[in-house]
Amino acid sequence: MDIIHDMKCLLRCCVQAHSARRESLKLDSGIINGIKQLEVLYATNASEKEEEPIFLLSAGWRTGSTLLQRLIMSDTRVLIWGEPYHECGLIQALAETTQAFRPGWPKQKWFFHGESRDHLPNQWIANLFPPIENWRKSHRALFETLFANPAMRAGAVRWGIKEVRLTIDDARYLRWLFPKGRFLFLHRHPLDAYLSYRRRGGGWYNTFPHQPIITPTAFGRHWRERVEGFIQFGGELDGLIVRYEDIVSGRTSLEEIENHLDIRIDRAILNIKVDGLEYEREKKSIGPIEKCLLKRAAGPIAKALGYEW
């Protein structure tokens, strides 16, 4: 009888747990909704000192992001870190922590609001959270310690990050941390980017070790997911969307980038070729199957942007 009773209790607990999970999934949790809830819990102080970091987000590898990074850094006041600790997925992991915030969580009674801890041993403190404003401050402190402070020591007065892995949701997280941050979103023809990627050997990671980008399908999906977000929502972040082809052809004026970022660019950088390869690789081309897979993965967005195959 005890076994039957235990089994009934276990079954009832499982049913309740699954029911609670289904209700949680209905909340449409995600980074953007988590950030909205954080803003409900703690409104950013408009009077606090705000930095203006530069976030250069590219739709994957071999899109000309390093050229644009070098152009920006020709302004001697600026230091842009290049894909810092990229395979760790640091920024993505920090952004994903916001997804847990939702209506009703955390409960207000969990936050510590007092100035003294003396009364706490006499209370229920299984859930005892530091004040919510310290959540955002702690995230900012990591960026300031890891990125801003070394840039200042190097003589820069502004800092930034160039990345090829971040999505529009990651950009929303960065905007939440740094409301005055300046965003550039860069893309290039996926076929040209993939050809260059293959010549470099490919096989790089989105995050290590479980997300290698090996196939044309994986490369195309990575490109599409970022470009779709940049195009659809980049304007909400006051971001400037730039095509690599327009930079090298002169169709996108450097003045537009200068005005957007409030910097001054040395045009001579365009004439200085810098290649990260330590040795020449055999030039490669792709066959029709690879091309078909890439085109299918990149989706209609590539065609909408005027990219011919």
Image (cartoon, rainbow, N blue to C red):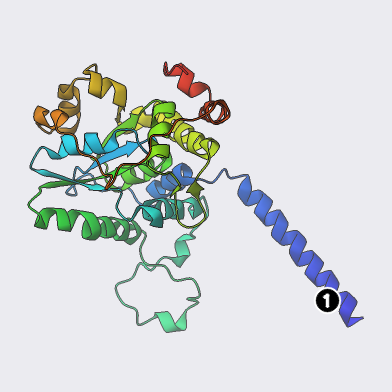
Tell me what residue is drawn at x 32 percent, y 57 percent: 139
Location of residue 75 with respect to 257 vertically, above or below: below
Across and down, in percent, residue 259 comes to 15, 27
Amino acid type at circle 1 is: Asp
Tell me what residue is drawn at x 20 percent, y 29 percent: 260
Location of residue 28 with respect to 84 vertically, above or below: above
The quarter of the displayed image where residue 197 is located:
top left
**Image quadrant where one finds the N terminus:** bottom right
Question: Would residue 79 appear left or right of 251 to someone viewing this image?
Answer: left
Across and down, in percent, residue 242 comes to 30, 26
Across and down, in percent, residue 164 comes to 36, 41
Q: Nearer the viewer, residue 124 or 179?
A: 179
Question: Would residue 249 appear left or right of 235 to someone viewing this image?
Answer: left
Q: Nearer the viewer, residue 56 or 170?
A: 56
Location of residue 118 with respect to 258 vertically, above or below: below
The quarter of the displayed image where residue 6 is located:
bottom right
Across and down, in percent, residue 59 comes to 39, 35
Residue 235 visible somewhere in the drawing: yes
- Residue at far right of view: 1
Residue 243 visible somewhere in the drawing: no
Mark 1 sits on what residue?
Answer: 6
SS type, badge 1 = helix
Question: Would residue 138 appear left or right of 219 to someone viewing this image?
Answer: left
Q: Nearer the viewer, residue 2 or 103?
A: 2
Location of residue 205 with respect to 111 vertically, above or below: above
Tell me what residue is drawn at x 37 percent, y 52 percent: 91
Tag count? 1
Q: Nearer the viewer, residue 134 or 103?
A: 134
Q: Tag 1: Cα neighbours inside 10 Å, few (<14), some, or many (≥20)? A: few
